[in-house]
Structures are given as C-alpha cells and as structure tokens.
C-alpha cells in the first residue's frame, strides 16, 4: 500500500511536470506566432519605406528641374529689368 501511494505521488509529480511542459510549449508557440507577425510587419514596413524612398527620389528630381527653371526665369527677368533700366537711363540722357 505504501508503494502504491509512492507510485501515485510519483505519477502526480510526473503529470504536473508534463502539464508545465505543455504550458511552456503553448507559451513558446504563442511567442513564435508573435515573432512571425512582427517579422511580417517589419517586412511590410521595409517595403513601404522602399516605395517612399523611390517617391522621394522622384520628387527630388522634379524639385531639381523646377529649381533650374526658376533660376533661368530669374536670370531672364533680371536681364529684362537691367535692359529696361538701361533704356530708361539712355532715354533720359538723350
């Protein structure tokens, strides 16, 4: 009878350890699912960042083109103003 109780207590301890292992496995599985979800989110964010980088490069090219155009327009306007002032001064002297 004592041996029967000893066996039952051993089986109870083994059973509780198996339950703890099962709980640990479930926790590991949940953690793995979270890690996989985070990796997918990270990959999505990286893809979005790459797309935004490409868009930013396109915008930079447009800004550079517009800057050159505005610079040329400014030079033309300055030349026209200088010519107008020169014509006005020449007209006043003559």
Image (spheres, rainbow, N blue to C red):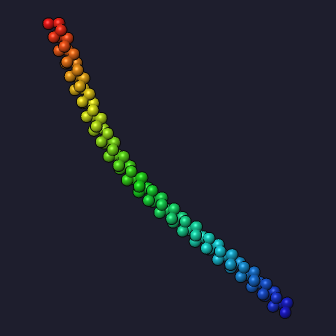
Which quarter of the rendered picture does the N terminus lie within? bottom right
**In which image quadrant can residue 22 be found?**
bottom right
Percent position of residue 28, x then y: 60, 70
Q: Residue at x 28, y 37 (%)?
A: 66
Q: In the depicted view, which residue is nearer to us: 41 or 94?
A: 94
Left or right: 12 as drawn, with respect to 63: right
Left or right: 76 as drawn, with respect to 64: left
The single residue placed furthest to the bottom in the displayed view is 1
The single residue placed furthest to the right in the displayed view is 2
The correct choice, above or below, for 21 with respect to 7 in the image is above
Percent position of residue 48, x then y: 41, 55
Left or right: 19 as drawn, with respect to 86: right
Q: Residue at x 41, y 57 (%)?
A: 47
The correct choice, above or below, for 11 with respect to 54 in the image is below
**In which image quadrant can residue 31 be found?**
bottom right
**In which image quadrant can residue 12 be found?**
bottom right
Percent position of residue 52, x then y: 39, 51
Percent position of residue 92, x then y: 18, 8
The correct choice, above or below, for 74 with respect to 64 in the image is above
The single residue placed furthest to the top in the displayed view is 93
Which quarter of the rendered picture does the C terminus lie within? top left
Q: Residue at x 58, y 70 (%)?
A: 30
Q: In this figure, what is the number of numbered marks?
A: 0
Q: In the depicted view, which residue is nearer to us: 88 or 65?
A: 88
Q: Residue at x 65, y 74 (%)?
A: 23
């Amino acid at each position: 009878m004592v041996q029967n109780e000893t066996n039952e207590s051993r089986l109870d301890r083994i059973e509780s350890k198996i339950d703890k292992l099962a709980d640990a496995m479930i926790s590991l599985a949940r953690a793995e699912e979270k890690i996989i979800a985070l990796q997918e989110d990270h990959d999505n964010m990286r893809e979005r960042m790459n797309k935004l980088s490409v868009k930013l490069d396109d915008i930079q090219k447009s800004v550079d083109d517009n800057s050159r155009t505005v610079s040329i327009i400014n030079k033309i306007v300055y030349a026209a103003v200088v010519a107008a002032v020169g014509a006005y001064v020449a007209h006043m002297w003559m």
